[in-house]
Amino acid sequence: MTNKTQETIYERALRVWHKEPQMLQVIEEMSELTKEILKNVNRKKDNIAEIVEETADVEIMLEQLKCCYQIKEKVEAYKTEKLKKIEQRLDEWEQTHDK
Ligand SMILES: [Mg+2]
């Protein structure tokens, strides 16, 4: 499925099911992923299939959130800058801890 097709579906979902319920769905999906991560880490549950499913659900809802608030480009720009800082911190960490 192309990015263009996916975006059309996100925009359609927002139009058909409306913004507020879809933004609450973002929260619901994040909560479901949170629960699966906690089961995996705290209870050592073999739930990779559930983690895959909930990660996909969260990613789909985050794409809708970006459409809803029209922040896709700003999020991408922030991510690029944030990743540079993380990379820098990793470099510094490895220089002081690995030697
Ligand atoms: Mg889900």
Image: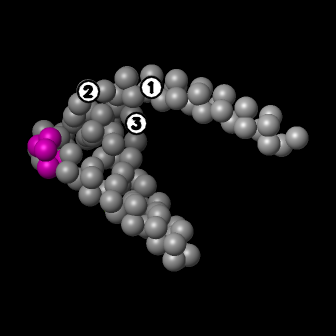
What residue is disc 3 on? 2
Of circles 1 and 2, the one toward us is 1
Q: Is residue 30 visible?
A: yes
In the displayed structure image, the side of residue 46 where residue 32 appears, left or right: left
Q: Is residue 49 visible?
A: no
Q: Is residue 58 above or below residue 43?
A: above
The residue shown at (38%, 47%) is 59
What is the CA distance from the residue labelled 1 to the residue labelled 2?
14 Å
SS at circle 2 = loop
SS at circle 3 = loop
Q: Mark 3 belongs to which amino acid?
A: Thr
Nearest the eye: 4 or 76 = 76
Residue 55 is one of the magenta-drawn residues: no
The residue shown at (80%, 42%) is 97
- Where does the image place residue 68, in percent across and percent down from the top left? 22, 34
Q: Quadrant of residue 28?
A: bottom left
What residue is disc 1 on? 78
The residue shown at (51%, 77%) is 43
What residue is disc 2 on? 70
Provide the residue span drawn in magenta: 18-22
Q: Earlier in the sequence, mark 1 or mark 2?
A: 2
- Where does the image place residue 23, in percent across and percent down from the top left? 21, 45
Q: Mark 1 belongs to which amino acid?
A: Tyr
